[in-house]
Amino acid sequence: MPEGDTLFRIARALTTALVGRPLIAVDTTVPALARGELVGRTTVAVEATGKNLLIRLDDGRAIYSHLRMTGSWHVYRPGERWRKPRSY
């Protein structure tokens, strides 16, 4: 299970990759958000809170992420091949 130090490293990497930039695509299993409501929103902060990640947006909403037992986030450069499958 990812612990605090892992979450802080992930939050730091996501801060570098996301903060100050608009979301250009969102892939989610939540039907209300799958309509593209988050596209165009700008990320203002990424926080590690306990075993949770909060990606705060410019409209006051936040994307909540819990990594469960084996979850992870990956940051790739444009055009870079994914090293892990989308779901594993």
Image (cartoon, rainbow, N blue to C red):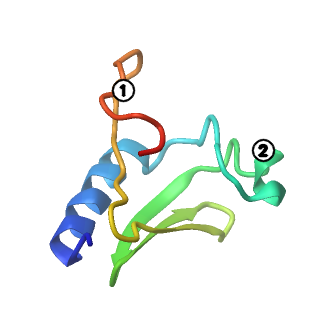
Spatial separation of the CA atoms under disc 2 and disc 1:
23 Å
Question: Residue at the location (33% across, 84% down)?
Answer: 50
Question: Residue at the location (25% across, 70% down)?
Answer: 2
The numbered mark at residue 35 is none
Q: Quadrant of the C terminus?
A: top left
Q: Earlier in the sequence, mark 2 or mark 1?
A: 2
Image x and y of residue 10, in percent: 28, 58
| 40 displayed left or right of 5 | right
Residue on which disc 2 sits = 36
Q: Are marks 2 and 1 in contact (CB under 8 Å)?
A: no
Badge 2 marks a residue whose secondary structure is loop
| 8 displayed left or right of 24 | left
Image x and y of residue 21, in percent: 50, 42
| 75 displayed left or right of 30 | left
At label 2, the amino acid type is Gly
5 over 50 or under it: above or below: above
40 over 59 or under it: above or below: above
Badge 1 marks a residue whose secondary structure is loop
In front: label 2 or label 1: 1
At label 1, the amino acid type is Trp
Residue on which disc 1 sits = 82
**Crowd around label 1: few <14 · some 14–19 · many ≥20 (10 Å):** few
Q: Quadrant of the N terminus?
A: bottom left
**Crowd around label 2: few <14 · some 14–19 · many ≥20 (10 Å):** some
| 24 displayed left or right of 87 | right
Nearest to the observer: residue 58 or residue 33: 33
Nearest to the observer: residue 52 or residue 57: 52
Question: Residue at the location (37% across, 59% down)?
Answer: 71
